Image (spheres, rainbow, N blue to C red):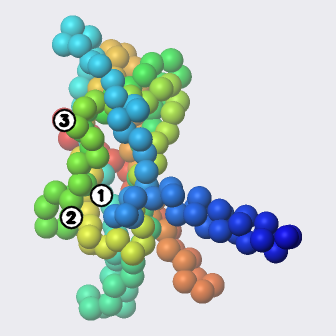
Amino acid sequence: MKRIIVLLVVFYSFYSCNEAFNDDGYEKINWSARQANIKLTDSLESGKSYLSVYSQIYSYSQHKMYNLTAMISIRNTSAKDTMYLSKVDYFDTHGTLLKTYFDKPVYLTPMETLDIVINEVDIAGGTGGNFIFDWKTPKNSPEPIFEGVMTSTSGQQGLSFLTQAKRID
């Protein structure tokens, strides 16, 4: 009987770990549960930010690639105001749109952080992938922060680096 219980616990653990990601390897964020109704009369300031991300980097030469896991961090830096994302698009090295994350605006509560994880096996973005974030904040609220953390480990070797978004509008 104990073996069956242990087997069920192990099976449940594996099942629950796999449940955090969609079939395409992207982390599950319930974007529809975060939908926000933004009225045209709301006095919000708009912005657009560009973030470079790397699914792969060159190693030794142009012909050897190293795959990376990319974590895209979306941070509301306001301690009192909710911020809104009206669009998040992911593009590959050639500028081809790979994914649009939601169709309607979503919110982040004060000081909240959301993470989008691109698995190491997903190399669609290539060496020059990027995100474009369209966002809105109340007037006089601090701008959000968008960062990319790229990591990989192999044996006893680890690699990690950070990119930060630049406001483009």
Q: Is residue 50 visible?
A: no
Label 3: which residue?
Answer: 169
Label 3 sits on what residue type?
Asp
The residue that appears at 37% across and 39% down in the rendered structure is 31
Q: Residue furthest front?
A: 1
Q: Which is nearer the N-term, disc 1 or disc 3?
A: 1
**Residue drawn at (55%, 83%), measured in percent from left and top?**
154
Find disc 1 in the rendering and name its residue.
Answer: 52
Q: Quadrant of residue 105?
A: top left
Count the labels in the image.
3
Query: In the rendered structure, which disc, 1 or 2, sits on the residue that comes first in sequence?
Result: 1
User: Is residue 85 found left or right of 13 in the rendered image?
Assistant: left
The label on residue 92 is: 2
Disc 1 element: strand
Rendered residue at 19%/13% (across/down) = 40
The one of 28 and 48 positioned closer to us in this rendering:
28
Q: x, y percentage for residue 70?
A: 42, 62
